Image (cartoon, rainbow, N blue to C red):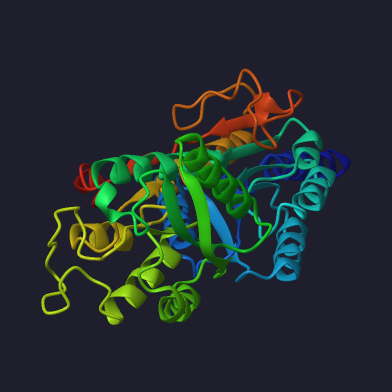
Amino acid sequence: MKKLMFVFLAVLLVAGAAFAGGQQDDGKTVIGALIRNTDEQFVADYADVLKGLAEEKGVELNLQDSRGDMALQLDQLNTLLSQGVKYFVVVSNTTEATGDIAKKIQAQGGGAAFSNIQPSVEALKVGPNFYLASSPESVAGEIQADILDKYFKAHPEKLANGDPDALDAIFLYGQLGHPAQTYRTNAVKQGLIDAGYKLNVVAEDTANWKPDEAQAKMDTWLAAFSGEFDVVIANNDGMALGAVESLLTAGYVDDPNDPSKDVDGDGIVLKVPVVGVDATQVAVKSMEEKKLYATVLQDAVGQATTAFELAYMMATEGSATGKKAWGLSPLSAPIDESPANDAAVAGQCYLVPFKAVTPDNYKDFMN
């Protein structure tokens, strides 16, 4: 009897160890995914990629959408941890919360790949099984600046005030203080200044990543500043498309009698170029219709795949340290943008590149 009890306890211990290592007692790998808000197109695309990867790998993916509510996201984390989930893909609502998220996961002996929203340096320092799988946001702004510099060099007549060195811009921001908002905005402004423009901000405000808010802001600015701005620069495609819709509705186009006609040959039917970030399929379709001028690919597939592969390696092998994910190696040296600017955690950072999407190459990004 004692021998049977010993065998039974041993089986329980082995099963418990398998679950603690990221697997259920049936041997199936389990990964949790904390996703901030699938109402945003990019995040919805990201979540879909995770689901597809989990299906391919036979992984049980427990995906939770917090709908932009940080308190709810923390509750979702606590619930998954209580269910024995240890390894996660985390698209946090805020950078500030990532330290607490990492500590909670570390307390259960787990790990996480933070993605899309940059974690804090402190979050990555919680332990070696915490990673960044994202894109350096400042690069998106730099690419926007480069796209616009090329546009206005080719079409100097499109500068409203007639000064080839002056640029009058309207800015639509994401959630203020959000890492993507801060880095993208600062980089595009500095990029334009570095290109030699005297940058005049005609109007600027947050539209919280949302098309409808951006459209409402643009409606107001059109009434106040019609003919006084050269470009609309948005932190994401959703807001850029909201601005496009406002401009189209107001007839702010080359030919009000035929709003599908590109009269001046600059590649768009609007009087001014509008640029965004993400290269969602809706945005690329708008480019095909010569409405949105350009965007910057924030690679949902690349970010989600990198994060998923890191979480999968942790769940199945115990660690992903030093290994490639989505063909990417971790950084060998720090960069200027947090958290990858700290040498102590640079080796935990996997950076997915941004890409310019312009009238010349947008077809390459259509599904």
Residue in the picture at 47% in, 73% down: 214
Residue in the picture at 29% in, 81% down: 249
Q: In screen coordinates, is 317 left or right of 79? A: left
Q: Position of residue 297 (x, y in %)?
A: 39, 46
Q: Is residue 70 above or below residue 6?
A: below
Residue furthest to the right: 2
Nearest the viewer among 167 and 137 is 167
Residue in the picture at 14% in, 54% down: 265
Q: In screen coordinates, is 306 left or right of 130? A: left
Any part of residue 315 in sight: no
Q: Is residue 217 above or below residue 165?
A: below
Residue in the picture at 56% in, 51% down: 185
Any part of residue 342 in sight: yes
Give the mark count. 0
Q: Position of residue 169 (x, y in %)?
A: 46, 58
Q: Position of residue 216 (x, y in %)?
A: 47, 80
Q: In screen coordinates, is 289 left or right of 148? A: left
Q: Quadrant of the N terminus?
A: top right
Nearest the viewer among 21 and 329 is 329
Residue furthest to the front: 162
Image quarter of residue 62: bottom right
Nearest the viewer among 343 and 184 is 184
Q: Position of residue 180 (x, y in %)?
A: 58, 51
Q: Is residue 346 above or below residue 121?
A: above
